Image (spheres, rainbow, N blue to C red):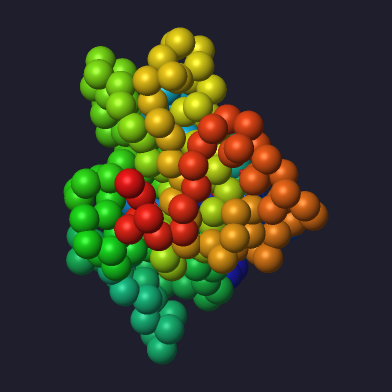
Amino acid sequence: MARIVVLGAGIGGVPMAYEMKESVGNEHEVLVISDSPTFHFVPSNPWVPPKWRTPEELKIELAPVFEKKGITFIQKAATLVDPENNQIQLDDGSAVDYDYLVIATGPRLAFDEVEGLGPEGHTTSVCHVDHAALAADDWEKFMENPGPIIVGAVQGASCFGPAYEYLMILEAELRKRKVRDQVPMTFVTSEPYIGHLGLGGVGDTKGLMESALRDKTIKWVRNVHEIT
Ligand SMILES: Cc1cc2nc3c(=O)[nH]c(=O)nc-3n(C[C@H](O)[C@H](O)[C@H](O)COP(=O)(O)OP(=O)(O)OC[C@H]3O[C@@H](n4cnc5c(N)ncnc54)[C@H](O)[C@@H]3O)c2cc1C
């Protein structure tokens, strides 16, 4: 019997483990290692700050679902992959041997690349559900005394869609709360042009996004120094 280890239980790791188990059945062991006890549906994070969803609604306890599927689950952080010995070391000092390894640990959020960026700096984030929960607290404080808002994506970002999505969600919420007129909105992006999305555009996203932002009187800039 071989042991197939999936490292990480996010959008990549969980379907991987399900599919793998379905394919190998009980002939081989499928074992998932994740540092979090819960799966998070990341694309819904932008709904958390305006309270369209609670953080709990985006989380699923992994242990019971994996048990039901016959998948072994270890809730610990991996500290080292040792391919020479086919072994993963865990943060409690223990180790797990593997025959096959799938690494699905997702992106590392590089807030440290831009000084002051991120929830430990001066901006909020919707990249992780815990950041979105903090952003929800800040949003409530903001609503007590609304003022200008900047939403955006910085240099080095690879996925720009969520920034536009979050911008439009906040714009819709401000209108719903009838305070949109008190909130000048600016979108700042490192894309070469609006609607590029990190993909060179998708169809006419340049034209579509430019007219959507103009319609909603959202200013856009490519450099924070252009914000006045
Ligand atoms: C706000 C937002 C909206 C998005 N919207 C969309 C969308 O609409 N459509 C779309 O296709 N994509 C969307 N994306 C992108 C998509 O969410 C990501 O591509 C996807 O979550 C990546 O999945 P993943 O499994 O690779 O990583 P993750 O979802 O980050 O999962 C990685 C897992 O590995 C675990 N892990 C990390 N390090 C370790 C370690 N050392 N030891 C053990 N476990 C570890 C983490 O805890 C986590 O459970 C969005 C992203 C964001 C931020």
- Residue 14 visible, this angle: no
What residue occupies the far bottom of the structure in this picture?
84
Where 216 falls versus 154 (above or below)?
above
Is 34 or 225 nearer to us in this picture? 225
Kindly indicate the quadrant of the structure image that contains residue 49.
top left
At which x and y percent is residue 175?
50, 16
State whether residue 193 appears in this view. yes
Q: Quadrant of the N terminus?
A: bottom right
Of residues 202 and 96, the one nearer the viewer is: 202
Q: Residue at x 20, y 50 (%)?
A: 121
Place of residue 178 in the rendered image (x, y in percent of width and height, measured from the top left): 45, 10
Residue 61 place in picture, x, y as percent: 44, 34
Residue drawn where x is 26% and y is 29% of the image = 138
Quadrant in the picture for residue 54: top left
Work out whether residue 141 or residue 29 is closer to the camera in this orientation and state it: 141
* Residue at figure coordinates x 77%, y 52% from the top left: 204
Query: Which residue is located at x 28 percent, y 45 percent?
Result: 123
**Residue 91 at x, y = what percent?**
23, 62
Q: Is residue 166 above or below residue 206?
A: above
